[in-house]
Amino acid sequence: MSTHSQAGRRAHNIDRGGRRWAVVGLCAAFAAAPLAAQQAKGWKGLQRDLGAFRQVRFEVEGATARVALPRHPVAGHPWVWRFGPLAADPVLDQRLLARGFYVVHLTRPAAPHPPGGANDDPPKPSSTELAHAAEEALFDYLSADQGLGARVHLIVASDWKDQAAAFVARDPQRVAAVIAAAAWPWLPPGRAYLLRPEADRLDQIAFLKRHAAPGELQQDWHWLRAGLANSKLLLEKERRLRIAFLGGSITYNPGWKEMVVASLQAQHPQATLEVVAAGIPSVDSSGHAFRLERDVFLHGPVDLLVVEAAVNDATNGRDAREQLRAMEGTVRAARRINPALDVVFLHFATPAFLNSQRQGLTPEVVRVHERVADHYALPSIDLAREVGDRIDRGEFRWKEDFVDLHPSPFGQRLYAEALLRLLQDAWRAAAPGTKLVGHPMPAMLDRFSYDGGQLLDVENHGIAVGWWIDESWRPRDGAGVRRGFVDVPMLVTDEKNAPVLLHFEGRGVGIWAVVGPDVGVLEYSIDFGPFRTLDLRTRWSAGLHLPWVYLLATDLEAGDHRLEMHLSESTPADRGWLRIAWFLVNR
């Protein structure tokens, strides 16, 4: 008979006697935000509703156990036991809960008092024995009484590895996997291995003592958060789905998105899939926020919005404040148009991102975008992390296989498979629904986010002297152009000091300019303030007429304002044009 079985009988006998499981009481929050019946039924101890999940706390063998219950548990009731400090990684806990895992933590029992009294007093149990007794009793209670999975996934901090190893050794068959937490010395800081609920395998105990081959780990690089229940309902029940892909050149170029759509169509042959291709090379999140209505929603509603901007946000030099305001603005504006819209964030790979990760750092732009994703409970995929991790494992090489930040067909396939895994995991975890549900709209992270972003056409807005409308602008210098910014009306001038005035209502203003080899220097003033100088030339302008967003004021108080602009006298002699495709206003 295994030690586990003996401990199980002891735990249940003691439990029926009511001695070791101390009921702390019920908190007033128990009545709020009801959970599924199987979650609330029969749990001992103090129950607290914490919004995204409910926590149950109780005493067992002198230790305190805490169990976080997911709102939407998946089949089999998989669970993760954290061997480590309490709340060591709350973000990871939230992600696991969103995927349907129960998350368990057990404090180490208090050290026994030194022996005293008569010489014939029974010896006191050691702290190790107390810990083992608490672990056995807790495992039996959760697996046998509460119906959690018969095999547990362990996530182990470095200074708890001996305690976890002893737990595994006492009965290896009850452990599905052992995962190293980020503090382990042989893993890069910040890395976490997330699990699939259906995982059913045993990593060797030796993993706790040495570095296991990374390829053996079951790993994902995505976070489901609130999931994608609405798009699941539309695809599986109504057999239709309209997907928009919003991004830069990696989205504009053919490859991964077409693979995703083809795979979904093959899996759902009776469904009607429509695609809105809204990728424009060089455009970053600031552009996304202002072009959303024109490029995504102009021809009708969208059910699933896939957004990428990390590469261009970093490459174009947008600072963290701009990144947050633009990504948050995009989400809020999109969900104001369609409250039931499901949204996914992607973070593509660049050599700079991979270098940061190898130094144990998460690229700033990924941190900012993830802050927005967390706040609005959006699923996301860190593709840069996946590419870097898999290269470091020796699965493939950057230059020979992935080739560039504009991926080879191999890289396109990797991106497509990653998004398909997220979609399948999210749809599998989503509870069955009968109607679309609007997503909650939390308070804004930044009150000046670009959620009111609008494009104003240059033909009907602004007053200009010395400027004119080129009805179908096309460059004459042979430099490259971007689709959507050629053969379109453009407000242009080559006359210095010729003014253009724009009266607008809102919190911010800017221009969407086309900046090629001949672009000049802009001078502008807001609300009769001093003129400021801005050279519109970028490091790519020498050979390309780029569409570029310049936000000239972003933190104005809501109300009426005035913008005045002209071509500056300081413009170099070999440059002398300004071209504006749209005025930008954040209402």
Image: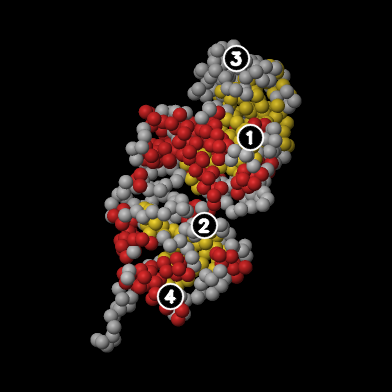
Residue 498 drawn above or below residue 34:
above
Q: Secondary structure at mark 1?
A: strand
Amino acid type of the residue that numbered disc 3 sits on in the rendered structure: Pro
Residues marked 1 and 3 touching at CB (< 8 Å): no
Q: Which label's residue is closer to the chain start, 4 or 1?
A: 4
How many C-alpha atoms fall within 10 Å of the one at disc 4: few (<14), some, or many (≥20)?
Answer: some
Amino acid type of the residue that numbered disc 2 sits on in the rendered structure: Ala
Q: Position of residue 345 (x, y in %)?
A: 54, 41
Q: CA distance from mark 4 to mark 1?
A: 56 Å
Determine which residue is flagged by label 3.
Answer: 475
Determine which residue is flagged by label 1.
Answer: 274
The one nearer the camera, 333 or 19, is 19
Q: Position of residue 229 (x, y in %)?
A: 60, 49
The one nearer the camera, 73 or 297, is 73
Q: Which label's residue is closer to the chain start, 1 or 2?
A: 2
Q: Residue 375 vs residue 338: left or right?
A: left
Determine which residue is flagged by label 4.
Answer: 12
Q: CA distance from mark 4 to mark 2?
A: 25 Å
**Number of the front mark, 4 or 3:** 4
